Image (cartoon, rainbow, N blue to C red):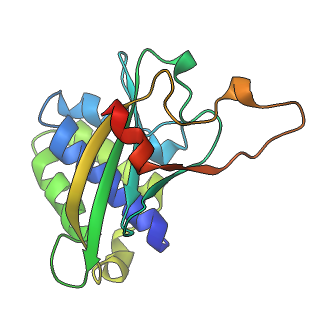
């Protein structure tokens, strides 16, 4: 996994561990994690969807959006963006293999959830035999914010696209999202 993919996977796993698993059934939580399946958003629940975005840059931070559908709430009940801002270092924080081990340990009592978790890790491109490649960088959470995507939230949606335009990728300033926290 490249640097951005590692950081993105770490962010999804942190949301899974810290926000989702403590609140719902373990198998349901892992089933809702659809980021590795190349779905439009990273977590899909019957009542809402969550797109996870990570940054590690200094100010002005921006979110990279991968398509006109990623922040389009018109086809889902509710859409949230979870933005995690990290400090990256060689020593102060948690590595990607650390959070994988931590999650596996928390799922030990639920074989079906653990099997599904391991399958999703494989789908995301995470292989245990490469874990040494991911042990040199640690992630320390600087800030976590969740934004509700609605109304004037800064984004491009499918209905905004003119005929002949495609492969839409763009960025959104985090400062402009704060009104939707």
Q: Quadrant of residue 121?
A: bottom left
- Compare residues 100 and 87 and report the one nearer the observer: 87
Q: Residue furthest right?
A: 164
Of residue 111 and residue 20, the one placed in the foreground of this image is: 20
Residue pictured at 9% horizontal, 42% vertical: 109
Q: Which residue is depicted at the point 49% across and 18% down?
A: 76
Please state the horizontal and vertical placement of residue 158, each as a whole percent of the image: 69, 28
Q: Quadrant of residue 10?
A: bottom left
Residue at the (33%, 70%) spot, across then down? 128
Residue 129 image point, x, y percent: 36, 76
Instruction: Please say whether residue 164 is visible from this viewpoint.
Output: yes
Is the C terminus in the top left, top right, bottom left or bottom right quadrant?
top left
Placement of 63 over or under 79, stated as above or below:
below
Q: Position of residue 25 (x, y in %)?
A: 17, 27
Left or right: residue 40 versus residue 53 is right
Q: Is residue 68 left or right of residue 13?
A: right
Circle count: 0
* Residue located at (41% from left, 49% from top): 174
Q: Is residue 61 above or below residue 98?
A: above
The answer, for residue 33, to whether it is visible in the render is: no
Residue 179 drawn at (x, y percent): 35, 34
173 or 34, which lies in front?
A: 173
Indicate left or right for 84 with 17 as reference: right
């Amino acid at each position: 996994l490249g640097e951005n993919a590692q950081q993105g996977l770490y962010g999804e796993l942190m949301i899974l561990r810290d926000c989702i698993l403590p609140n719902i059934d373990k198998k349901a939580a892992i089933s809702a994690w659809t980021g590795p399946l190349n779905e439009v958003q990273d977590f899909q629940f019957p009542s809402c969807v969550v797109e996870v975005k990570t940054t590690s840059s200094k100010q002005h931070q921006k979110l990279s959006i991968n398509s006109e559908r990623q922040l389009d709430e018109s086809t889902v009940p509710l859409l949230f963006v979870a933005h995690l801002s990290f400090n990256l270092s060689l020593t102060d924080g948690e590595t990607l293999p650390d959070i994988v081990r931590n999650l596996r340990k928390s799922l030990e009592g639920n074989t079906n959830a653990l099997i599904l978790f391991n399958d999703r890790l494989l789908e995301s491109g995470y292989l245990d035999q490469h874990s040494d490649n991911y042990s040199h960088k640690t992630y320390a959470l600087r800030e976590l914010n969740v934004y509700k995507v609605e109304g004037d939230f800064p984004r491009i949606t499918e209905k905004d696209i003119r005929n002949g335009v495609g492969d839409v990728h763009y960025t959104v300033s985090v400062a402009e999202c704060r009104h939707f926290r």
